[in-house]
């Protein structure tokens, strides 16, 4: 192994870390602000790639696919947070959506249909309507603990959404593997000191640097950033001094979904887009958050760099124990500092 090997592997590890920063920074902020373990965060990454593919197939524009996919998944995250991860407001809409979902399952079970292609709609619609009305009124009379105070419900709800998103992706885009092909200008290599480095990976690093700088400016230099920092430190005290923590949570959740989808579009060029990608990338995102500390952008950046380098060098040098080399730094940091490198007590 010569010097070129170490340079190339380090460059690849940093570029992979840049991708993980886009994914992990949003998860870190969501975890820090809302104290929600969002197990559907990997789904935003996967869905971002699928939506980008749809835009590319429709318009042929890779550049348009990036903002279109990121904004679309941001809206999905915003709706999910407002309707299902908040106990205040939209209760009737939430109950109606749940009632419709349960009614569809009841109708399919009664009719013995396994797919919608087999459904006899003349029988399905009346049964579904009656079941939906009955379930809706039943839900309105059930008193439950607010979801913000019940971590188990948060975990079950978000993992349920992860499975729903995965099945939706399978039904809409099939189970085939797809690649997002960037413009030809980004498929070339640059030569530095006789070492050929992929230009696209350099582009990934540049995007992560720009996004990181923009996030830092927003968090450190704006009123919204001050509200986010206050909510991370002490949400109850922030509410006491007039911070609208509900609006902060909505903004952060949508931002986290936006960043994850952005990572999915950019990462789709070399990871590919396929069912199951969400659950493969999710543990890496949590490793970034655990190492860096929840709610810290600097921690997310350092954590992403550590995970990216550990994963890349582990697979290159010790492929048989690559998982150990990936998660060993996380275990070591947790043993020394349980809140992560930049986490607050």
Image (spheres, grey):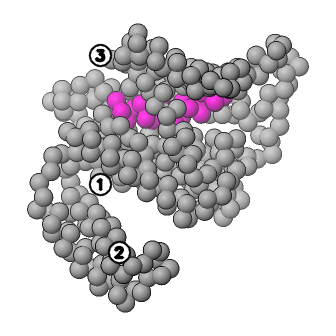
Q: Is residue 339 left or right of residue 275?
A: left
Nearer to us: label 2 or label 3: 2
Q: Is residue 215 left or right of residue 96?
A: right
In the rendered image, which quarter contains the C terminus? top left
Q: CA distance from mark 2 to mark 3?
A: 50 Å
Q: CA distance from mark 3 to mark 1?
A: 31 Å
In the rendered image, which quarter contains the N terminus? top right
Residue occupying the point 45% across, 74% down: 114
In the image, the segment drawn in magenta is: 15-32
Residue 189 location (% of width, % of height): 83, 32
On screen, residue 233 above or below 137: above
Residue that numbered label 1 is attached to: 83
- Secondary structure under badge 2? helix
The front one of 131 and 208 is 131
**Disc 3 to disc 1: CB gap under 8 Å:** no
Residue that numbered label 3 is attached to: 345
Residue that numbered label 2 is attached to: 109
Q: Quadrant of residue 199?
A: top right
Q: Quadrant of residue 30?
A: top left
Residue occupying the point 18% across, 73% down: 134
Residue occupying the far top of the picture: 336
């Amino acid at each position: 192994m010569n010097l070129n090997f170490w340079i190339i592997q380090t460059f690849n590890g940093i570029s992979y870390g840049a991708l993980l920063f886009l994914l992990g920074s949003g998860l870190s902020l969501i975890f820090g602000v809302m104290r929600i373990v969002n197990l559907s965060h990997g789904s935003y990454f996967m869905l971002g790639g699928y939506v980008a593919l749809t835009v590319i197939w429709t318009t042929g524009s890779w550049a348009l696919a990036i903002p279109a996919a990121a904004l679309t998944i941001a809206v999905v995250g915003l709706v999910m947070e407002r309707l299902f991860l908040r106990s205040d407001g939209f209760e009737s809409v939430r109950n109606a959506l749940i009632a419709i979902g349960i009614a569809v399952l009841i109708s399919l079970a009664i009719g013995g249909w396994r797919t919608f292609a087999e459904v006899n709609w003349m029988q399905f619609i009346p049964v579904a309507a009656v079941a939906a009305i009955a379930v809706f009124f039943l839900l309105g009379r059930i008193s439950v603990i607010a979801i913000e105070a019940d971590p188990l419900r948060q975990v079950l709800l978000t993992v349920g959404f992860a499975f729903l998103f995965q099945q939706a992706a399978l039904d809409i885009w099939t189970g085939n593997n797809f690649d997002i092909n960037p413009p030809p200008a980004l498929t070339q290599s640059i030569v530095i000191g006789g070492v050929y480095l992929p230009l696209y990976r350099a582009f990934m690093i540049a995007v992560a640097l720009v996004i990181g700088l923009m996030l830092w400016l927003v968090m450190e230099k704006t009123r919204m950033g001050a509200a986010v920092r206050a909510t991370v430190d002490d949400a109850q005290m922030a509410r006491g001094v007039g911070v609208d923590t509900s609006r902060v949570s909505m903004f952060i959740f949508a931002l986290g979904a936006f960043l994850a989808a952005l990572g999915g579009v950019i990462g789709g060029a070399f990871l590919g887009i396929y069912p199951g990608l969400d659950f493969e990338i999710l543990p890496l995102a949590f490793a970034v958050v655990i190492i860096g500390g929840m709610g810290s952008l600097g921690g997310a950046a350092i954590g992403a760099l550590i995970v990216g380098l550990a994963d890349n060098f582990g697979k290159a040098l010790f492929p048989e124990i690559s998982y150990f080399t990936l998660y060993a730094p996380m275990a070591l940091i947790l043993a020394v500092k349980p809140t992560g490198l930049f986490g607050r007590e």
